[in-house]
Amino acid sequence: MSGKTKAARAPSEGLGAAKRLVVKIGSSLLADEAKGAIRHDWIAALAEDVAELRRRGRDVVLVSSGAIAIGGTQLGLAGGAMKLEEKQAAAATGQIRLAHAYQEALERHGITVAQILLTLDDTVERRRYLNARSTIDTLLRLGAVPVINENDTVATNEIRFGDNDRLAARVAAMISADTLVLLSTVDGLYTADPERDPNATLVTEVRDITPEITAMAGDAPPGYTSGGMVTKLEAAKIAQTAGCAMVIVDGRRMRPLSALAAGAPSTWFLPKGEPRSARKHWIAASLKPAGVITVDDGALKALRNGKSLLPSGVTAIEGAFERGDAVSVATTGAEEVARGLSAYSAADARRIMGHKSREIQQLLGYRGRDEMIHRDNLVMLIDGGNEPGS
């Protein structure tokens, strides 16, 4: 932790340095607490910020709370503790209204909105993770702004996040975002509860979440399900490990992202490395290969030059792996040169190896990826070339 010391990403340049942002929005920012109505004026102001970021070439993903609060009011459930099934009913009702509010606000700027509902399992189970990542990447490439929330209507207690802070951090890690913004009702992390301790000061920068930092968050909220500073620190741990910077800032002001860029009080959690390097380290060091893909000299040269692995350069497939499994990439001399996540199962990989990408649909009966292993999902283990995906 440091107050104003210079770091890898100083608070003053944090948002300006961002290329892909995930912005988490708390329920209290979206819904009028007294009426449970959507704050359309606030969403419209946020949409201006999002549109400005998009004009600057930034990718933006929104992780939005608020569906249960808004839907509960519509169903007459507000004002008391709701049972799980009532929360799920409220979410089903509120999600439609919330998505429409985002659509209406961003449409004024010519921006298409896409709704994605996720559960904890979707960010943990490999194939669902890959599908979600691919969908979000595709939407961003096509110019849309994904709006993500937890799929409360189907999630049980066992597969729920329970708070969107950690969901947002998982999404940021999933899509290799470099910045996660938590729009909250506080400026950031204080040395103590500022409402109880007049001497509490704002911590502007956190490099490591030490026991001292954890103690500043205080106790977890009842049931550890509704956010609070404790879950924000849990989100920061996920983000930092994934190479993603995270910032907590008061979102109650109009155009909160513009205010953050202008230097509004906040707490920045500095990342450990870059998103892509963190992901590559995970692939190289944490995954046990489920099979081996042997490549020819031409493919090896392409990999060393930072290219993806195409089916045409594959000469043999060993093992019984599925799409998304880690595999070893080896030369015809059986030397392991790389590791990556296969875009195809072993059975399908055998059918398309040695063939051009344009032949995949004819060979498999469906149109898959052009690459056997995309460069973003591949890390070289030998010297002699550029890092794939760099």
Image: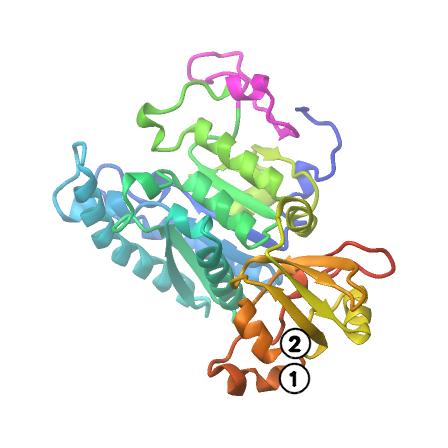
Residue 104 versus residue 8 in the image, above or below: below
* Residue receiving disc 1: 356
Q: Secondary structure at mark 1?
A: loop
User: Which residue reaches farthest left?
Assistant: 76
Q: Residue at x 27, y 43 (%)?
A: 156
Question: Residue 213's spot in the image, x, y percent?
Answer: 57, 21
Q: Which residues are magenta?
A: 190-215
Residue 75 versus residue 324 in the image, above or below: above
Q: Residue at x 56, y 23 (%)?
A: 202
Can I make out residue 254 in this image? no
Q: Residue at x 53, y 85 (%)?
A: 363
Between 241 and 163, the residue placed more toward the observer is 241
Residue 200 inside the magenta-drawn segment: yes
Question: Residue 2's spot in the image, x, y percent?
Answer: 68, 24
Left or right of 266 on screen, residue 109: left
Left or right of 180 on screen, residue 283: right
Can I make out residue 76 in this image? yes
Mark 1 vs mark 2: which is more N-terminal? 2
Secondary structure character of the magenta stretch overall: loop
* Residue receiving disc 2: 311
Near mark 1 (Cα within 10 A), the count class, few <14, some 14-19 or many ≥20, is some
Residue 365 versus residue 377 in the image, above or below: below
User: Which residue reaches farthest right?
Assistant: 384
Q: Badges 1 and 2: C-beta atoms under 8 Å apart?
A: yes
